[in-house]
Image (tube, rainbow, N blue to C red):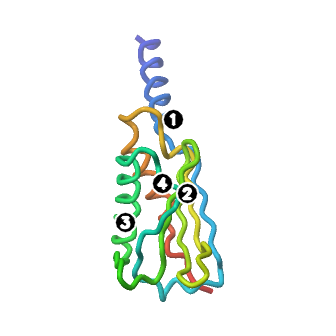
């Protein structure tokens, strides 16, 4: 009986560990006053070959921003958002309109699993973690 419980606990822990996001890293330009940024639009990055994956990631990012009071405005944005894909990682960049240089970057390593059944979970967890402390406090 005790061995069965131990195996059950180990399997549960292994399952949780396999669902974890490997790493999320956020960097940003501390000179940017994020208080003035309210409206965003999408710009070309490195699109995923999988259009469904691209749509899911964009939807997750947009959802996080809207919850924080931002809104999509393709006609008059304050900043642009680009996504890039490298292996199982997603890179999200916020880009300045004038310089076209990124001023905020989030990297979710392990956000794109090979197994479809974990995809939605990992995308949502990585995006939530990436935007947890967004926008950064201006100094």
Q: Are marks 3 and 2 in contact (CB under 8 Å)?
A: no
Residue at 38% from the left image edge and 85% from the top image edge: 76
Residue 139: where, in percent of width, then height? Answer: 63, 86
Residue at 46% from the left image edge and 17% from the top image edge: 7
Nearer to us in this view, 28 or 97 = 97
Cα distance in 3D space between marks 1 and 3? 27 Å
Q: Nearer the viewer, mark 3 or mark 4?
A: 4
Residue at 48% from the left image edge and 30% from the top image edge: 13
Q: Are marks 2 and 1 in contact (CB under 8 Å)?
A: no
Callout 2 secondary element: strand
Question: How packed is label 4: few (under 14 Cα within 10 Å), some, or many (20 or more)?
Answer: few
Q: Nearer the viewer, mark 4 or mark 1?
A: 4
Q: Quadrant of residue 103?
A: bottom right
Q: Nearer the viewer, mark 2 or mark 1?
A: 2
**Marking on residue 91:** 2
Judge from the rendering whether residue 95 lies leftward or rightward of residue 29; answer left or right: left
Q: Which residue is mark 3?
A: 62
Q: Earlier in the sequence, mark 3 or mark 4?
A: 4
Q: Which residue is mark 4?
A: 47
Cα distance in 3D space between marks 3 and 2? 14 Å
Cα distance in 3D space between marks 4 and 1? 29 Å
Cα distance in 3D space between marks 3 and 4? 16 Å
Q: Which residue is mark 1?
A: 17
């Amino acid at each position: 009986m005790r061995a069965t419980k131990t195996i059950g606990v180990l399997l549960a822990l292994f399952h949780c560990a396999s669902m974890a996001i490997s790493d999320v890293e956020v960097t940003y330009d501390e000179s940017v006053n994020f208080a003035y940024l309210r409206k965003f639009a999408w710009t070309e990055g490195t699109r995923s070959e999988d259009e469904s994956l691209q749509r899911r990631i964009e939807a997750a990012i947009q959802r996080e921003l809207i919850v924080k009071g931002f809104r999509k405005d393709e006609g008059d944005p304050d900043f642009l958002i680009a996504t890039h894909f490298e292996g199982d990682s997603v890179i999200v960049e916020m880009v300045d309109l004038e310089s076209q240089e990124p001023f905020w970057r989030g990297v979710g390593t392990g956000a794109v699993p090979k197994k479809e059944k974990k995809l939605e979970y990992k995308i949502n967890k990585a995006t939530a973690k990436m935007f947890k402390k967004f926008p950064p406090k201006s100094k």
